[in-house]
Amino acid sequence: MSPKVKNFLWCVCRGYFPTGACLSNRCVSCSLDCVFCNSNYEDITHVPIECPKTFRTWRDVNLWDKIFDTFELMKCHKFLH
Ligand SMILES: [Zn+2]
């Protein structure tokens, strides 16, 4: 897994990824819609896993299985809320 993907997952894991929901919780005025698919609530589970556009990207670069497994592991260890 590339350092960029590892960094992305680390940011997600630590809650540093600036999703609409995350920014809204910090009183930042912004859209809660996903910037990739414009159709869902953009939170920390939508962006890396649930977003159809993100899913296609991970699948196209053959990283979907690793991303999904890593995300599930993070959930098991309660890094994600
Ligand atoms: Zn989306």
Image (tube, rainbow, N blue to C red):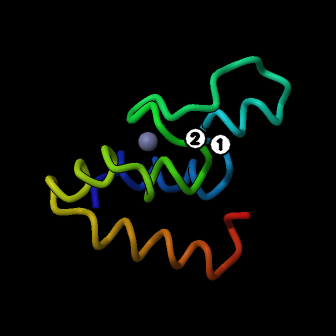
Question: At label 2, which amino acid type do we have?
Answer: Glu
> What numbered label is drawn on residue 53?
none
Asked which secondary structure carries label 1, the reply is: loop
Kindly identify which residue carries mark 2. 42
Q: Is residue 22 left or right of residue 49?
A: right
> Between marks 2 and 1, how big is the CA–CA gap?
14 Å
Kindly identify which residue carries mark 1. 16
- Where does residue 24 sit, x and y in percent of width and height? 77, 30
Q: Is mark 2 within 8 Å of ligand 1?
A: yes
Residue drawn at 45 percent across, 53 percent down: 48
Asked which secondary structure carries label 2, the reply is: loop
Q: Is residue 12 left or right of residue 8?
A: right
- In the displayed structure, 78 sits above or below 9; it is below
Q: Quadrant of the N terminus?
A: bottom left
Question: At label 1, which amino acid type do we have?
Answer: Tyr
- Where does residue 26 sit, x and y in percent of width and height? 83, 31
Single out the residue that lies furthest toward the front: 39
